[in-house]
Image (cartoon, helix red, strand yellow):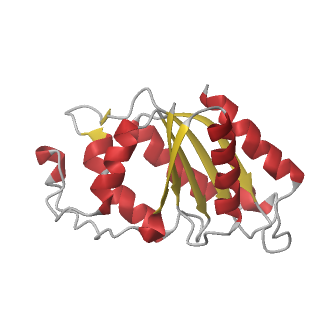
Amino acid sequence: MNILIINGSPRKKGLISQMLGIVREEAEKRGDTVEMVYTNDLTVKPCTGCMACRTKEKCVLAEDDSQRVLQMMQQADAIIMGAPCYWGNIPGQMKLMFDRQVYGMMRDTPRFPEPLMKGKKCILISTCTTPWPWNILFKQSRGAIRAMREIARYAGFKIVGTIERGGTAMHPELTDKDKQRCRKAIERLS
């Protein structure tokens, strides 16, 4: 299986990066081919909202890393997205990338958007400083999951698992339970 991991965290040693690292390790143990993209390492210009990509089926802005990552997504069998919570949402650099890829993830039709990533599986992972259960009740990590779920749903991905971890300020280390959840998540892609 070809797996693309999209890391929306600016911290390459932070909890999201650690969690995605565990998932990657497990996938590689299974014999999967895994590629990882760090959204903060990408050069992506902001979407101008011109909507031309909806009819041209390509972005009219100069080519940048958003098109390269979109091609990787199109070639992958599964996507794993991980992002820390920023104000109840995903970090801006990750959102910027997805804004520029909309034409390759869904197509407008007269009735309802047509998903272009059907048949691909997806796992979503998020962390936040707000402690459990408030991270869920106040829609912090849940807000980041919601944003990624919305992107994945409209693109046609089948979401096979989510992992949310709150309270990272008070408990900045992964627990054995966190690590186990990451190891088990990869099994859902089978």
Residue at x 61% of width, y 25% of height: 190
Residue at x 46% of width, y 39% of height: 153
Number of numbered discs: 0
Residue in front for this viewpoint, 173 or 140: 173
In this view, which residue lies farthest toward the right?
176
Q: Is residue 40 visible?
A: yes
Image location of residue 149, percent across then percent down: 52, 45
* Rendered position, 189 above or below 162: above
Image location of residue 181, percent across then percent down: 78, 43
Seen in the image, is 50 located left or right of residue 134?
left
Image quadrant where residue 18 sits: bottom right
Residue in front for this viewpoint, 139 or 8: 8
Image quadrant where residue 59 sits: bottom left
Image location of residue 102, percent across then percent down: 30, 50
Seen in the image, is 134 located left or right of residue 88?
right
Image location of residue 5, percent across then percent down: 53, 49
Seen in the image, is 19 located left or right of residue 152?
right
Q: Is residue 100 visible?
A: no
Residue in front for this viewpoint, 34 or 20: 34
Residue at x 33% of width, y 49% of height: 70
